[in-house]
Image (spheres, helix red, strand yellow):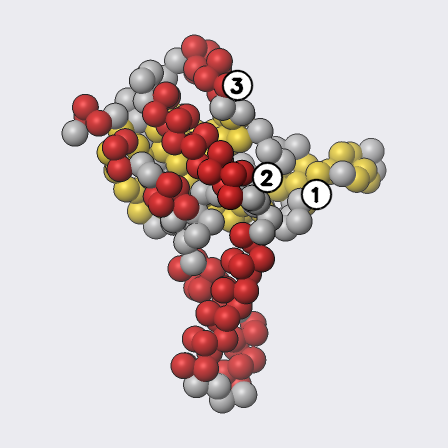
Amino acid sequence: MFFTNGQEFLVCNKGVFKNNFVISMCYYIITTLPKDSNILSLKPLFEKFNMSFKPLKNKNLESQLRPGELYFRATNKYCDCDTILGSRNRSQEYEKLLKSKKIKTLRKKKWSDDEIDNWIMEKITSKYHKKDFKKTSLEVDEEINNWIDFVENILKSVKRIGLLKHWYKYNLEKEEFELKRTEQQNLKDLSAEKILKLEEDVLYEFFPSYSY
């Protein structure tokens, strides 16, 4: 944490943010709920599973959701850079590296596509190997189970819940980005593997099993 001009800023290892507004890059988890959800009655559930559910107002995101859909910042954390959600999905990391300045430099040096692919995969493998040691296996299991239990419990009270992971470059209410797609999922398909491999910028809508 640091202060400048009397304003309080919070810092994670990947970005800087002030209150609800990202100053530089961080991951955040966004959740969506049907417009008729009784948020007040759900607060004890949010508290039980350490969720925040702070309402957001982002016209760009809102235009891509169902009419009247409610959407929130999910967790109580400063940011979600260390979230287990999507932490084992490497496709986004590959695409980011492929478009990086480093790759442009390697292409100018006449590196072949195979050489570039090998370089990217080595970088990703090294990064994920280091990341695996940031949390113990017990901590990983606890976080996975917390998300699964939370979704199972909230679906007893609402028709659906959406989960979205996005890498924010600006603040949460100003950022403009395009959802890749929306996927509708049966609750019974929610597993540890699904949690670990959620794709960035995809809205996953989970429904109770009886809805299918």
Instruction: Name the residue furthest bottom.
Output: 110
Can you see residue 28? no
Q: Tell me which residue sits at (53%, 68%) in the image.
A: 123
Residue at disc 2, secondary structure: loop
Residue 159's spot in the image, x, y percent?
A: 28, 22
> Which is more toward the observer, 11 or 44?
44
The residue lying at 16 percent from left, 29 percent from top is 212
Residue 48's label in the rendered image is: none
Q: Nearer the viewer, mark 3 or mark 2?
A: 3
Disc on the earlier residue, 3 or 2: 3
Q: x and y percent of residue 174 in the render?
A: 54, 41
Front one among 110 and 134: 134
Q: State the residue position of label 3.
A: 47
Residue 146: x %, y % from top left: 45, 30
Residue under circle 2?
79
- Tell me which numbered mark, 1 or 2, is placed earlier along the sequence: 1
Q: Given the image, on which type of amino acid does mark 2 rest?
A: Cys
Quadrant of the rendering where the N terminus is positioned: top right
Q: Earlier in the sequence, mark 3 or mark 1?
A: 1
Q: Residues within 10 Å of mark 3 (few under 14, many from 20)?
A: few
Of 145 and 80, nearer the camera is 145
The residue at which mark 1 appears reads as: 11
Amino acid on which the number 3 mark rests in the picture: Glu
Q: Residue furthest left?
A: 212
